Amino acid sequence: MPAVNNVLVVGGGLAGTATAILLADSGVTVDLVELKPDAAALGSGITLQGNALRVLRQVGVWPQVSQLGYAFDTLGLRAPDPAGTLLAELPDHRTGGADLPATVGMYRPDLARVIHDRARQVGVRVLLATSVEKLTSDDSGVDVVLTGGVSSRYDLVVGADGLRSHTRQLIGIDLQTQPTGMGIWRAFTPRPAQITRTDLYYGGPSFIAGYCPTGPDSLYAYIVEKAQDRSALTAQQRLDTMRELAAAYHGPFDAIRDSLTDPATVNYTWFEAHLLDRSWHRGRVVLIGDAAHACPPTLAQGAAMALEDAAVLAELLLAADAVDDGLWEAFMDRRHDRAGQVVSASVQLGQWLLEGHRGADVPGLMGRIAALVSTPA
């Protein structure tokens, strides 16, 4: 028998929903609560590396992901010159194995719909516009009070509710999330026919410009700058600012810039990072995904780390006879250092750019992380 019979998952993102699916598909009763009224309502694009695809295949949604997303196996490097000159076309690491693409770009709301449909298919009870108001953990379970005063008891609570995790606060963990010094402009646009992979432009007036195809007709473009307070800008001013920054990048970026006409498609956020020390649980409440570790998207491993958390946690819970110290030690042995290396490397890459460190071994760092995550978690 698995170590748990009924589980509450808090947070309907990738980490939480994948955990819910893997447990429910093996007979565990799972409730999933999500604060948003529609878990698929927000977002632009997402880059899914091979090790993320490996877990999505395990979850049972790879056919839909491969159909709706856009797969590619190379990475382009371009110069910030008037022609957007292609400097190199590099084979990307197939970190999920030879039978999966190196990378898939996907529209975030499509991915959310696919994975939530799968959760309902395997019997997860999904409660939207619902949050946790109180948690009381003891040796055998957790008493939970949900929105509206509804009370239930669970064998385990999984807090997968993101960077600003409310679950983390409820169990008394004070984790300081730190800005890394960079801000990113993102926009969701039509895909020009000539764009068939991610290209990156390093340098120019911004640190990085790039794009990722997310489907047959779509992509998301991004520009990374020094973090600034952009909160006072109107939607139109945000669009105008991204277009102004994009004017320095050419080649395929010219067509992207021309398509930037809708202010609603543009958003701006800061890069942030944190890593929770061992252990990620308090009693019978455990944190996973961004609630426990978060990194800037410089290595595009955030989604993959969240999905790996889900796969490892579900595997251990289904194989164990009890929720005990041995289970938590095994979970930390497989997740803490691996996630920590990804967080550290992601922050380091950004720091090199901030410092203008021309001698930095960027290929070596990227290769080291690719080798690390190519081995299943």
Image: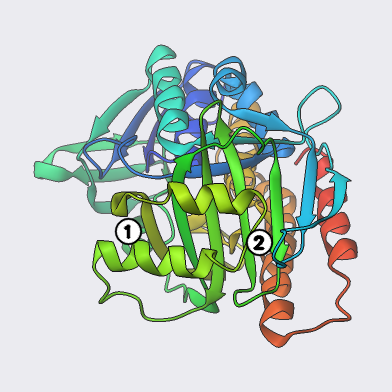
Q: Amino acid at mark 1?
A: His
Is 286 drawn above or below residue 201 in the view shown?
A: above
Q: Is residue 257 left or right of residue 88?
A: left
Nearest-to-viewer mark from 2 and 1 = 2
Q: Is residue 183 left or right of residue 97?
A: left
Is there any visible trace of residue 320 in the rendered image? no
Q: Residue furthest bottom?
A: 355
Q: Is residue 244 left or right of residue 98?
A: left
Read off the residue under disc 2: 298
Quarter assignment of residue 347:
bottom right
Label 1: how many residues lie within 10 Å, few (<14), some (14-19) or many (20+)?
some
Please tell me which residue is depicted at 88% across the width and 62% down the height of the picture. Answer: 363
Please tell me which residue is depicted at 27% across the width and 73% down the height of the picture. Answer: 233
Quadrant where the image shows the N terminus? top right
Quarter assignment of residue 156:
top left
The label shown at residue 60 is none
Out of 15 and 345, give the one closest to the viewer: 345
Is 106 drawn above or below residue 335 in the view shown?
A: above
Quadrant where the image shows the C terminus? top right
Q: Which scheme is used to colour this image of the protein?
A: rainbow
Q: Amino acid at mark 2?
A: Thr
Q: Residue furthest front?
A: 82
Is 110 drawn above or below residue 347 in the view shown?
A: above
Q: Residue 93's spot in the image, x, y percent?
A: 84, 42
Q: Residue 323's spot in the image, x, y percent?
A: 55, 40
Label 2: how many residues lie within 10 Å, few (<14), some (14-19) or many (20+)?
some
Is there any visible trace of residue 50 in the rendered image? yes
Under tag 2, what secondary structure? Answer: helix
Read off the residue under disc 1: 166
